[in-house]
Image (spheres, rainbow, N blue to C red):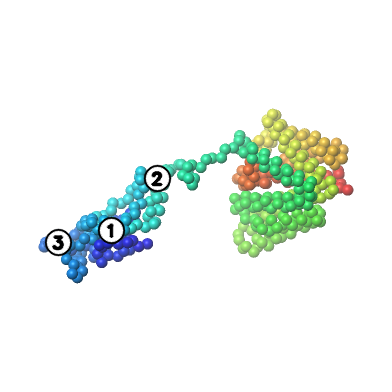
Amino acid sequence: MSYLEPRGGHPGSRASDPSDAPPPYAGNRPPAEGLTPPAAGRGAPPPRSVPQRSLPQAAGHEGPQTGPIRGGHQPDPTWAHQPTAPTPVTGSLPDRAEPPFPAEPAWAAPTAATSTSQAEWELTTAETIHRGPGKRRAGRDGRPVPQKQSGRAGRNLPAAIAVGASLVLVVLASMLVWKPAFLGVIALASGVGIWEMVRALKVTGARPPLIPLVGGGLLMTGLAWYEGPDALEIGLLATLLAALVWRFSEHKVGFRRDMAAAALIAVYVPFLLSFGVLLVKPDDGPGRVLCALLAVVLSDTGGYAAGVFFGKHPMAPTISPKKSWEGFAGSVTAAAVGGALLVYFLLDVPFYWGLLFGAVISVAAVVGDLAESMLKRDIGIKDMSNLLPGHGGLMDRLDSILFAVPAAYLLLSLIAPPG
């Protein structure tokens, strides 16, 4: 950006001369050649080893120049107050310390205009000095951003309760009002879970392809609904093949690492979750899904209560320090008793089979919870995402269900075959 030359300047100067730059761009630089005024009188000493050159006078002009003259002499101050001269723009701010700049040499004349970059630089410097080191970044209004408050468990308890109740109502409504809507719930949960897993595994450097995994998840859900478990396995193979082809087309390094991550996601999220579609498909499918989900809830509740009151022996301290063997016993007991009642009243299954059903679901739920905890610790994250307030990510709520639903489908196929 060029700088405007003040009125009265000599014709030998350039508007874009670097010496015209305002601080901090002006430095201790020698004057441009040819800008030294002529010596006055005979025998006057030369000005500071700068070659003398006389400045030409305009025709018909007499008397000394009134414009700013460089070369060690102070210019006539009246030129800056002429009405046609532009108003100088300064970047200084009131009541704020200015950063130290090198001393301006005597030959540097004042400028009548400044640059936008200088104003932005001075404003940024002033804000940095005003804020100071070690302080939190302020919001748009200049005030510090307040930190979010959470409960003792590190979660927003009211939000967690509201989100959990909403999810339960959505699942119940999709099963009881119109059963095919449950297919859409499973498909949506599969897509969100795949997105969270792909996003979380990027921390390790893996880049599993998102698009073929989401498409394969939808394919597996549809095949499980319309064709059954055999077609579900074909959908899994098709998903892995699509991820393989997609990864080949990208021509990037880390092929084995990315394909291992893609295989983990395809099996862990859409394949296991599609067993929920197989579970709800029979005529008494809603009762089967309720037995499985409520058994998981009873397992979590019994384990929490027993761990709080009796927990002394850690179960897996390096994976989940809060889990204890006493809590695990409480999980199995609560799920076994509750599962026996559930399958008896909802599916007309004898109590002893119900006890086995509840115990198996509890073990599967605990294993699923530990598996995701181990995965998150290996990655180095706390939650899969922050999608659900008070819960973290959707996968943080599906960790126990993902292992419990296939176990419920296989076990109920033996003790209470459909039809």
- Between 240 and 167, the one lying in front of the other is 167
- Report helix, strand or loop for mark 3: loop
Identity, as a three-letter code, of the amino acid under mark 2:
Ile
Identity, as a three-letter code, of the amino acid under mark 3:
Ala
- Between 377 and 305, the one lying in front of the other is 305
Residue under pointer 1 = 83
- Which residue occupies 35% across, 62% down? 2
- The residues tagged by marks 1 and 2 sit, at their Cα atoms, a distance apart of 36 Å
The x and y percentages for residue 64 are 17, 62
- Which residue occupies 20% across, 62% down? 65
Classed neighbour count for the residue bearing mark 1: other residues with Cα under 10 Å, few (<14), some (14–19), many (≥20): few
- Which residue occupies 84% across, 46% down? 284
Note whether 57 is above or below 102 in the view shown.
below
Residue 168 in sight here = yes
- Which residue occupies 70% across, 34% down? 304
Which image quadrant: the N terminus?
Answer: bottom left
Disc on the earlier residue, 2 or 3: 3
Note whether 301 is above or below 234 in the view shown.
above
The x and y percentages for residue 407 are 78, 45
Residue under pointer 3 = 40
- The residues tagged by marks 2 and 3 sit, at their Cα atoms, a distance apart of 48 Å
